[in-house]
Amino acid sequence: MENSVAIVSGGATSIGAEIASTFAAAGARVVAADVDREAGEALAKHAGGKIVFSPMDLTSDADIARTVQTTLKAFGQIDFVINAAAVYQDQGPASTRADWQKCFDVNVTGPVMLVRATQAHLARRPGAVVNVGSISAKVAQAGRWTYPASKAALHQVTRTLALDLAKQGIRVNTVSPGWTWSGGMEKLGLTRPLVDSIARDFHLVPRAAERSEVAEAVMFLCSDAASFISGADLPVDGGYCALGPEAKPSAFEKLAMAAQGAAQ
């Protein structure tokens, strides 16, 4: 990561801020691009010049272009693009057309436009793109319509970008976090022990992830250690998707117990 330059969309808060800080700690220079100006400026203030904040709304091509120019002016190059920004504008079956359009504009179209705006610069290294996908892209989740659909689309975008940008040497991958402890959970009044106690039944590793675990996976995919990985999805989900519908309890054992009970 030493002397490399990364743009992290959604880089002011939550997983995005963790990614920005992790890259900076490893020697990279980072532009944290986000709609949250207060959080972004605070992050940059404490980063000792390694993180620059750029206000950016992914639905605005002008904002995206301004962030690219801010990055080039500050650091002179762009090596990595990490698309961590996302909106959870999801009311399930009550989601309106506006909800669907907003969700796809931020979660799918925005990341594509950021890659498009940085493509020529990424090709000079060549660099890498990591899109933050989701376990929600892979399984049905009750009462969630727009967010999982948008993340599933982002996974397909990753494969398409990986194919078409390969000729320029640019690698494109996703990471798919499982339940990850976040400030948003705290705002809902949840505690870490409570979240872990619920996550235990849905993950092989019996807890929620740390944001740092997701950030380290993103950094790996950008590093030379992942030089032969492109078009792939790296699950950082503690085995969530490996469990399947039977979850942790043994379905066969339950059937056997039911048969024994019926025989009695």
Image (cartoon, helix red, strand yellow):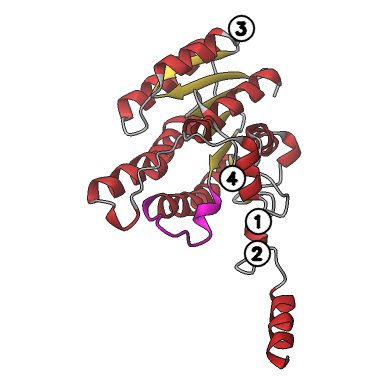
The residue where tag 3 is placed is 48
Count of marks overlaid on the render = 4
Label 1 to label 3, Cα distance in Å?
Answer: 41 Å
Three-letter code for the amino acid on which mark 2 is drawn = Ala
Pointer 3 local density, CA inside 10 Å: few below 14, some 14–19, many at least 20? few
Majority secondary structure of the magenta segment? loop
Instruction: Answer above or below: position of 114 versus 202.
Output: above
Of the residues under marks 4 and 2, which one precedes in the sequence? 4
Q: Which residues are magenta?
A: 134-146
The residue where tag 2 is placed is 247
Of the residues under marks 3 and 2, which one precedes in the sequence? 3
Of the residues under marks 2 and 1, which one precedes in the sequence? 1
Secondary structure under tag 4 reads: loop
The residue where tag 1 is placed is 201
* Marks 2 and 1 close (CB-CB < 8 Å): yes
105 vs 147, nearest the viewer: 147
Instruction: Answer above or below: position of 24 versus 188.
Output: above
| Residue 1 on image: x %, y % | 69, 24
> Which of label 4 and label 3 is nearer to you?
4
Of the residues under marks 4 and 3, which one precedes in the sequence? 3
Left or right: where does residue 233 sit relative to residue 145? Answer: right
Secondary structure under tag 3 reads: loop
The residue where tag 4 is placed is 179
Residue at figure coordinates x 62%, y 21% from the top left = 21
Secondary structure under tag 1 reads: loop
Pointer 2 local density, CA inside 10 Å: few below 14, some 14–19, many at least 20? some
Label 3 to label 2, Cα distance in Å?
Answer: 45 Å
Left or right: where does residue 170 sit relative to residue 63? Answer: right
* Marks 4 and 2 close (CB-CB < 8 Å): no
